[in-house]
Image (spheres, rainbow, N blue to C red):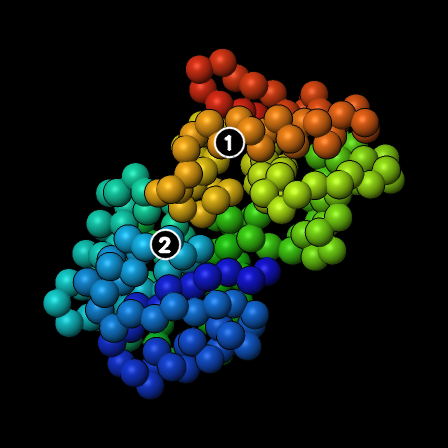
Amino acid sequence: MAATVLVVEDEPAIQELIAYNLRQAGHQPLRADSAEQALKLMQEALPDLVLLDWMLPGLSGIELARRLRADRRTRSIPIIMLTARAEEHDKLTGLETGADDYITKPFSPRELTARVKAVLRRRAPQMTDDVVQVGELHLDPATHRVSARSEPVQLGPTEFRMLHFLMTHPERVHSRTQLLDQVWGDHVFVEERTVDVHIRRLRKALEPTGQDALIQTVRGSGYRLSGG
Ligand code: CA
């Protein structure tokens, strides 16, 4: 499970410590000293998760969390708030603004990586290495292998990510925009019809195993993977 994690923290020593521990856990840290810098970085590319310090110079962590939740492009990025405050009231305020979890300083590297993993598993199961099974389809993220009734299925990297996302979010209709957000990470330069192209390739790859019917087109809405 390698995730890109944006660390927004103004204290250099803490920022360094967090980045070090994220790298040790196999993640790719990006760093910002302020909310303003974080916003600028996110204009270029979206991270898989944001670790956000509550007390920042200028725009506060809480205010940045509010802005990320109010913007359609950044709405679904998981956020973990970092704070020195342990009061229950502050914890509630943090969660109300849309943070997924909350870590109180000082925290151990072990706690940090465990929280990151738990939030990714809950909010972005396609980021984890957990094996997924829907109907006859079996997908192993660690080995990048897909099979149906033990028959291997050959997929390109984009089709693999798309199938992984669909299998970890079955029975739900995903619009093309949502699929672009989730599978491409960011879609500033990708057109919506690109999704259709990759869905076609995915179905074609699944056809020999008879599993292509799992991917359903929902007219006017998008796509759904249904195992039942
Ligand atoms: Ca701070």
Amino acid type for the residue under numbered disc 1: Val
Numbered label attached to residue 195: 1
* Cβ atoms under marks 1 and 2 closer than 8 Å: no
Q: Residue most toward the bottom?
A: 13
- Say above or below: 111 vs 81: below
Question: Which quarter of the rendered picture does the N terminus lie within?
Answer: bottom right
Mark 1 Cβ and ligand 1 under 8 Å apart: no
Looking at the rendered structure, the kind of residue marked 2 is Ala
Residue 85: where, in percent of width, then height?
Answer: 26, 71
**At 56% from the left edge and 48% from the top edge, which residue is drawn?**
125
Seen at 44% across and 55% down, the residue is: 48
Residue 119, relative to residue 181: is it above or below?
below
Helix, strand or loop under label 2: loop
Which residue in the rendered view is the most extreme toward the top?
219
Question: Mark 1, residues whose alpha carbon is within 10 Å: few (<14), some, or many (≥20)?
Answer: many
Query: Residue lying farthest right?
Result: 150
